[in-house]
Image (cartoon, helix red, strand yellow):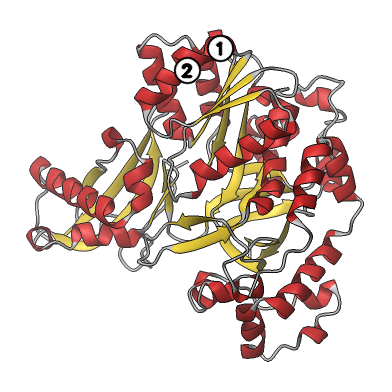
Amino acid sequence: MNSPQPVNNDDLFDRFLHTSLDQLLVEHQAHDPQQKVLDLFRRSADSVPAYRQFLQNHRISPNQIDSYPAFQTLPLINKANYMQAFPLPERCFGGSLLGADRIAVSSGSTGQPTFWPRSAAYELDVAVRFEQVFRDSFVADRRSTLAVVCFALGNWVGGLFTTSCCWHLARKGYPLMVATPGNNKAEIFRVVRELAPYYDQTVLLGYPPFVKDVIDAGTIEGIAWPDYSTKLVFAGEVFSEEWRELVGQRIGSTDPCFDSASLYGTADGGVLGNETPFSIAIRRWLAQHPEAARQLFGESRLPTLVQYDPHSRFFEVHEDTLVVSGENSVPLLRYHIADKGGLISYQDMWSFLKQLGIESVGDLGLPSSFQPRHLPFVYVFGRADFTVSYYGANIFPENVTVGLEQPELMQWLSGKFVLESAETTTGDKTLHVAVELLPDIEASPEMATKIAESIKIQLLRLNSEFANYTPVDRQLPQVTLHAFADPDYFPAGVKHRYSRRKPE
């Protein structure tokens, strides 16, 4: 059975290639996103066997879902209750993989990798997010641009998805050369030295800590990043505005709101939203006004703040975590992505800013002529579970547990630990594991070294993202040993959490 598509693929490509970014977004805003997600629900209930069975299991008749309020009553789907509960073809339109021509794999760190098929046509919504960054931030429609993809290449979603979307922009007429050295620093430097002098600007695309490593190592090797009008595209991790400033200085950035942008993306949904000069300017202002940030986000720490197109990816909030719906070969219907965050409409954002005396984009440091796109905002703190992101790899506590539960180590350890991705004073990322000793066991440097090596071995064995994303010289975790019931990490009588963000 062939997988039915919402419209002809040739029509989708023709529309993307021959319609300006401005017109695409205007057309999207002319349609009701709630109606679009209802249409996706109806097609999925009719044509996706797994979703039809999922509804039957919950005693839901598709005919009952005849309005957006009714749609909001649908049960959430996730990896456990849907993606891992039904065979892959049955989760696709038509119950077949024949409509898809490429595959991405998300982390198998919990024991079972998840495969995400898609067709090239389904990349076009995501390509629009890249187009926003390249056109609105980098003016790449008028500047010749070398795009250097520094994400790992292979089945992981970042590298090839990014490459393909950049190719779509080049096909649309952007003067764009796409180079794909992946996360090989020597090849990145080779590409930059050979090609960057021929282009007006160079864009490095990768996970934040790895891009910083590339910039620092390249500087040591004599690459003058400012000479190439270097721009940066990030994905995968939350970073501070101080970090953006630090990295920006090293590439000669003079306009942080226009010289970098972060993407909010997942293997299952593609790129869900992107930083814009407007969202960056707001975030930078909030970084200097922590009380305002706390009022807006409910926490003093700054989340990633991006704008999104609800016509492309439709967000809801469930118990302070994000839920997304969107078209794909495996359609997402109220899919719980477990990221802690929330939504702010464009109008509500302006109302909030005006309450604080911000009357124009000029008050945020943007050029007075700048016209923000009237798109809503989504903010993301990171995973709501115990997962830690490190160089773009999702590190699960289960991975570390295996490293600790080796016979030669358990004579010293209680089994408790705390996993965190920390940042040094120079802005580099480290993977830190605080480990609890058994009572009456004395710590020693040799003990910490053995534990770190064991954790590294198991991470490399169990976690393909860690093995392929993390530079070799960053793979050994920093292990600190703590006395039994240490009040800072292992307080007695408190439910233990196996990960945490770095202290404020």
Which percent across, then down, holds residue 352? Answer: 81, 42
- Relative to residue 182, is residue 412 depicted above or below? below
Which percent across, then down, holds residue 478? Answer: 26, 41
Instruction: Please give left or right for residue 103 compared with residue 409 in the image.
Output: right
Instruction: Please give left or right for residue 284 compared with residue 483 in the image.
Output: right
Q: Nearer the viewer, residue 224 or 346?
A: 224
Residue at the image point whose x is 57% and y is 11% from the top: 198
Measure the C-alpha gap from mark 2 to mark 1.
9 Å
Viewport quadrant of the N terminus: bottom right
Comparing labels 2 and 1, the label whose residue is closer to the camera: 2
Neighbor class of circle 2 (other Cα within 10 Å; few <14, some 14-19, many 20+) is many
- Relative to residue 158, is residue 212 depicted above or below? above
- Relative to residue 45, is residue 303 depicted above or below? above
Residue 270 seen anywhere in this rendered image of the structure = yes
The image quarter containing residue 288 is top right
Which percent across, then down, holds residue 366? Answer: 77, 22
The residue indicated by pointer 1 is 228
- Secondary structure of the residue carrying tag 1 is helix
The residue indicated by pointer 2 is 192
The reply to whether discs 2 and 1 touch (Cβ–Cβ < 8 Å) is: yes
- Amino acid found under the numbered disc labelled 1: Tyr
- Relative to residue 470, is residue 397 depicted above or below? below
- Amino acid found under the numbered disc labelled 2: Val
